[in-house]
Amino acid sequence: MSKKSTLIPIILVTSLFFLWALLHNLNPILIPHLRKAFALDDLQSSLIDTSAYISYFVVAIPAGLYMQRFGYKKGVLVGLVLYALGALLVIPAASERSYLFFLTAIFVIAAGATFLETVANPYISVLGDKETATQRLNFAQSFNGLGAVVAPILGGKFILSGIEHSPEELAAMGQASLNTYLQSEADTVKVPYLVIAGVVVVLLILFVFTRLPEGDEREVDDTHTVGVNFSFKIFKHKHFLWAVISQFFYVGAQVGVGSFFIRYANHVANMGEKNAAYLFGSVAMVGFMLGRFSGTFLMKYIRPASLLAVYGLLCVLLLIIAVFTAGDVALYALVAVPFFMSIMYPTIFSLGIQGLTNEETKIGSSFLVMSIIGGAVVPLLMGLVSVAAHSIQIAYLVPLLCFLVVFYYGWKGYVVIKPKAKSILEVMNDER
């Protein structure tokens, strides 16, 4: 494929990285917001992340099989339709003030995002030279970082009210006043999600009328086997197995770090929700975005796996400070973590699919996206620890342990082990 024929597809597919950033980075705003609107504790509010990442687990394999059969473009179209539908469902969920309805809407949005991620990550990798696949994926993921900056800032401005009543103040309200207050809190999500749905529909139209190449199909597996049995054979590649494990723990750590940031900022530095949301977006997520761009640059001189290991270790050290100190020192140690975790998802993804055939890459992408269920598990564990220890700060030990797994993958787990040559007897047995 020529650079000219791939330029427009790369631009359009890169725009998709912005969309799932909105989903994931509005969740740290929604968690404290709906915690107020529905009177939830930390464990209950973590179900917002659970509903999103359970969807990834359920939909990833069907999305990969759909992509195998119908190609990249149709996978994108399905993803955009689901994303827009879920965003529209948020509006009646807010009107009804139904937490279950709201979780369902988030699940549908995440189903759309699952299709988009399953398509976009491998598609960017095959649209161009293999030698620059990791750099190209990190560059595309940099626009995911842009969404990570915009989402909490706009969410903090248009969703969070800044009104934070104590339990005693809420108890002193009359029933009518309390219902009015809770409904006003729930209603603030309507306009932002209506705008998101409109943007997604416009993008859907652009994809409908744009011709997209399907990538280099010369490496398609000779068996052309499609199905669950073929899917599990991919785990014979040890580096891919470790990529799935590492991605599970990385995504869990990433989600956990962001999901309770506003609660953490209030706990260690007595910071209000609007200021914490702005700090998260304008500093932590700007660091995340800059980390993607700088990481892409550094990979010209440092092996991606080595950079991954170093960044994993630095995240562990920063979280030790965040857990065991207090005040601004603890807060800004946590703020620094997103810069170093910025390269992890695309780097693990790219290292995991190295050495796979085109067909293996498509179904392997499903498992790597499926491993995002770590984002459902780790926040729940953090919620449990927070409730048990009465401290959201202690709960950050959970992502600390997750980053140790990422460090190991960058250190040793990424190594591609080539299969041993078969003996004459093994070849004869295979032919029987």
Image (tube, grey):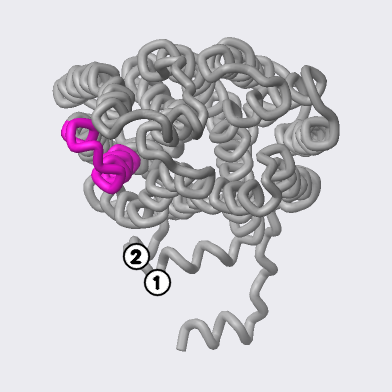
Residue bounds of the magenta highlight? 92-110
Residue 135: x and y, percent? 59, 25
Residue 138: x and y, percent? 57, 26
Residue pointed to by mark 2: 225
Dominant SS type (magenta): helix
Residue drawn at x 36%, y 38% is: 38
Q: Secondary structure at mark 2?
A: loop
Check disc 1 and give the amino acid type. Answer: Asn
Foreground residue among 239 and 212: 239
Q: Secondary structure at mark 1?
A: helix
Residue 16 quadrant:
top left
Question: Cβ–Cβ below 8 Å for labels 1 and 2?
Answer: yes
Residue 147 in view here: yes
- Image height check: is 116 above or below 155? below
Residue 73 quadrant:
top left
The label number, if any, that marks residue 38 in the structure image? none
Residue pointed to by mark 1: 229
Nearer to us of marks 1 and 2 is 1
Residue drawn at x 57%, y 26% is: 262
Mark 2 neighbour density, 10 Å: few (under 14) some (14–19) many (20 or more): few
Along the horizontal axis of the image, is 223 left or right of 373?
left
Residue drawn at x 51%, y 28% is: 166
Mark 1 neighbour density, 10 Å: few (under 14) some (14–19) many (20 or more): few
> How far apart in space, not on screen, are marks 1 and 2 (Cα)?
9 Å
